[in-house]
Amino acid sequence: MDSIRSEIKKYLQRERRKELPEGADFWEFDCKFGPDAEAAGVIHEFDIGKCISAAEKDQLRSFYVEILARPGYKTPPET
């Protein structure tokens, strides 16, 4: 499980280093996690580690992780 966490961390770092499209402020990640693709639910990027720990605790032999990078935009402050 530690090697999986490491690979995911490397992937996220690699994606964050990519050049942003014009006008974008940062990279956002749409993530899903579950025992398989059909049962995967939407999670926040920061919850990936918790989900992997839960899968390890439940002794799952495999699980599904989907991480899609997309440009993120800051919202202007309200005045």
Image (cartoon, rainbow, N blue to C red):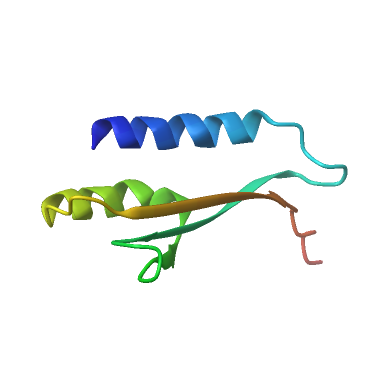
Judge left or right: residue 54 versus residue 33: left
Position above or below: 14 against 76: above
What residue is drawn where x is 40% and y is 64%? Answer: 37
Position above or below: 16 against 49: above
On the image, the x and y values in percent for residue 35 come to 28, 61
What residue is drawn where x is 62% and y is 34%? Answer: 16
On the image, the x and y values in percent for residue 36 come to 33, 62
Q: Nearer the viewer, residue 11 or 37?
A: 37
Count of number-bearing discs: 0
Judge left or right: residue 37 versus residue 27: left
For the N terminus, give its image quadrant: top left
Q: Nearer the viewer, residue 58 or 62?
A: 62
Q: Residue furthest right?
A: 22
Position above or below: 20 against 35: above
For the C terminus, give its image quadrant: bottom right
What residue is drawn where x is 40% and y is 32%? Answer: 7
What residue is drawn where x is 58% and y is 51%? Answer: 68
On the image, the x and y values in percent for residue 63 come to 29, 54
Judge left or right: residue 28 versus residue 12: right
